[in-house]
Amino acid sequence: MTLDELEGIRLADHEDLEHEEAARRLGVSRSVFTRLVDGARKKIAAVLIEGCELKIEGGDYHFENKRFRCQDCQHLVEIPLEEPDPQRCPTCGSFLLANLNLSFGLKGQCRRHGGDPHG
Ligand SMILES: [Zn+2]
């Protein structure tokens, strides 16, 4: 699935936003958003039921925030892109913070912000 689909699922199903609001955040029309989420749900269903591998592909994805997952307490740390990376988990003080943006292969940079992937 694409990062756009993933973000659609996140907004609609994880943050429980109205499709209207979620579509606005993704910068697409409501009907496009609904199709995006429907397609993503089918792919997720296939993964769960048929055991397909779930692949997240690049897309025109806009990271508004940097996200880090504490490996000790699973706390999700979310900070604006322009802020420096957090060194410690604000909840438990652990140094084991996994950069979730890095796991998408974008090196924490947003292409729309003109980030140089090699810089
Ligand atoms: Zn923690």
Image (spheres, rainbow, N blue to C red):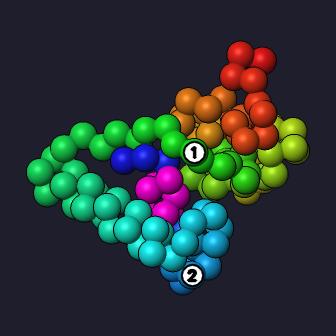
Whether the residue carrying mark 1 lies under 8 Å from ligand 1 is answered with: no
In the rendered view, does 92 fall on the left or right side of 98? right
Asked if residue 9 lies in the magenta stretch, the reply is: yes
Label 2 is placed on what type of residue?
Glu
Percent position (x, y) of residue 74? 57, 52
Label 2 environment density (alpha carbons within 10 Å; few <14, some 14–19, many ≥20): some
Up the image or down, 43 lies above or below 88; here it is below
Start and end of the magenta stretch?
A: 4-10
Per the picture, the main secondary structure of the magenta-coloured stretch is helix
In the rendered image, the quadrant that contains the C terminus is: top right
Total labels drawn:
2
Spot the residue most to the left: 50
Mark number, residue 60: 1
The residue nearer to you, when weighing 115 against 14, is 115
The residue nearer to you, when weighing 1 against 80, is 1
The residue nearer to you, when weighing 91 against 7, is 7
Label 1 is placed on what type of residue?
Asp
Up the image or down, 67 lies above or below 95; here it is below
Q: Mark 1 falls on what kind of element? A: loop
Q: Mark 2 falls on what kind of element? A: helix
* Residue 72 seen: no
Spot the residue most to the top: 118
Q: Residue at x 31, y 61 (%)?
A: 39
Q: CA distance from mark 2 to mark 1?
A: 20 Å
In the rendered view, does 24 fall on the left or right side of 47? right
Q: Residue at x 57, y 45 (%)?
A: 60
Q: What residue would you read off at disc 2?
A: 20
The residue nearer to you, when weighing 47 against 96, is 47
Asked if residue 69 lies in the magenta stretch, the reply is: no
Percent position (x, y) of residue 68? 66, 45
Q: Residue at x 72, y 42 (%)?
A: 112
